[in-house]
Image: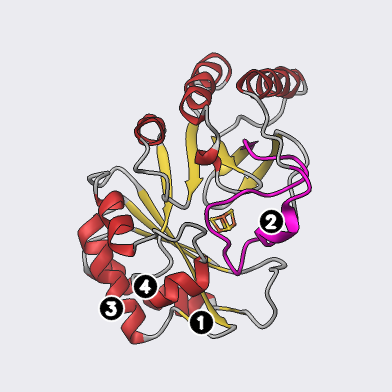
Amino acid sequence: MLFDTIIFGPIKSRRLGVSLGVNLLPQHGKICSFDCIYCECGLNADGREDTQLPTRQQVRKALEEKLIAYKQAGGEPIDTFTFAGNGEPTLHPDFKEIVLDTQKLRNQYYPDAKISVLTNAWQLDKPAVLEGLRQVDNAILKLDSAIPSTLLSMNRPVSPTFNIDTLIEQLASFRGQCIVQTMFLRGAGVDNTTPAEIEAWLGALKRIQPSLVQLYSIDRKVPIEGLEHVGEEELKAIAAKVKKIGLKTLVTP
Ligand code: SF4
């Protein structure tokens, strides 16, 4: 499912509260540096009809118009401005500047709200992306596996230079000021719930030391057949292992 507007929601999210979405990607297409088998936006190959990114000015205007209308309608206070949408938000060339614009509008209209970015964390070698992410309250970084073959099968990075050790070191460079988000699933030749997977993933988490680890599983339509949801009890059992190494967890079944 694609988001067909620049600003979407707000929606009630168990993880983020009342969340207003910001989509920096095309409104009728998908662009991402990963091509995850579980992506709710579909596969990259199916989302190439529209490659037009909104401009910084368009995003600021759409956000301010939405905030004015929402305030006037007496909507429930916004808890989080969430950069998500049809692909990877940090691929937008003005990502950092748009974060700064959003901070200004947040301060003006909902000063208590947080700013969150859902990212696959594969643009962290770009200084502007890193600076933008360091400005936000919740940098939510994807790490679905610490075993290269599993990560390649599950997330299917587009870049041939993708390297899992680099990814983990980039996550660790946040020095704990980040949230790690992990999708657990089985099927289509992938299973990131095995003891070997969990052991390797816990090792990476020890290195990264995130402020929170979010565990979830598929709950909507996914583009690849045969993927299985991992149930709440199993997610909680994995979360208990994360707590044992001293990290906070949030399970979203
Ligand atoms: S990183 Fe996110 S947007 Fe990109 S393919 Fe994976 S789930 Fe979809």
Q: Is mark 2 within 8 Å of ligand 1?
A: yes
| Disc 2: CA contacts within 10 A as few (<14), some (14-19) or many (>=20) | many
Q: Is residue 27 magenta?
A: yes
Q: Position of residue 104 (x, y in %)?
A: 50, 16
- The CA distance from mark 3 to mark 2 is 30 Å
Tell me, for residue 199, which label it has, or none.
3
Q: Which of the 4 image quarters holds residue 149?
A: bottom left
Tell me, for residue 190, which label it has, or none.
1
Q: Secondary structure at mark 1?
A: strand
The type of residue carrying mark 3 is Glu
Tell me which label, 3 or 1, sits earlier in the chain.
1
- The CA distance from mark 4 to mark 2 is 24 Å
Question: Which residue occupies 69% across, 56% down?
Answer: 41
The type of residue carrying mark 2 is Cys
Q: Main secondary structure of the magenta part?
A: loop
In this view of the protein, which residue sits in the foreground, 199 or 223?
Answer: 223
What span is in magenta?
21-50
Q: Are marks 1 and 2 in contact (CB under 8 Å)?
A: no
Tell me which label, 3 or 2, sits earlier in the chain.
2
